[in-house]
Amino acid sequence: MQERIQHQMAKTNYSYEKRQKELAKQKKKADKLLKKSGQKEESADQLPADLPPAPDETPVIH
């Protein structure tokens, strides 16, 4: 009772490569959006300083 063992070559995991490519695209897009929003924030920092500061927390009601 000899069993034949067939050795197969490992298949390339194309779904992994595709996922990595998609993640890279998403990261690049997010970085680009952050960069754009950072430019807007810098221009907002140049507004007059006489505005009241925003509250850090909402009041807690006991």
Image (cartoon, rainbow, N blue to C red):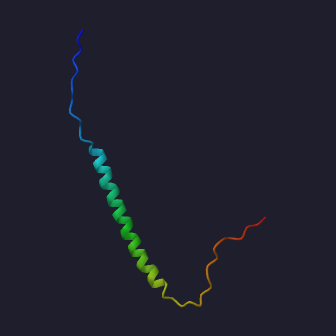
Q: Is residue 38 left or right of residue 58?
A: left
Q: What percent of the width, then of the height, locates residue 43?
A: 44, 84
Residue 36: name its quadrant: bottom left
Which residue is depicted at the point 21% across and 27% down?
A: 7
Which residue is depicted at the point 31% across and 46% down?
A: 16
Residue 10: name its quadrant: top left
In the image, residue 29 sits, relative to residue 51, either above or below, namely above
Residue 35: name its quadrant: bottom left
Q: What percent of the width, then of the height, locates residue 30?
A: 39, 65
In the image, residue 13 sits, relative to residue 8, either above or below, namely below
Which residue is depicted at the point 63% across and 74% down?
A: 56
Which residue is depicted at the point 79% across and 64% down?
A: 62
Q: Quadrant of the N terminus?
A: top left
Number of marks: 0
Q: From this viewpoint, which residue is outermost toward the front? A: 2
Q: From this viewpoint, which residue is outermost toward the top? A: 1
Q: What percent of the width, then of the height, locates residue 47?
A: 51, 88
Q: Is residue 37 left or right of residue 21?
A: right
Q: Is residue 50 left or right of residue 41?
A: right
In the image, residue 7 sits, relative to residue 20, either above or below, namely above
Q: What percent of the width, then of the height, locates residue 31?
A: 37, 67
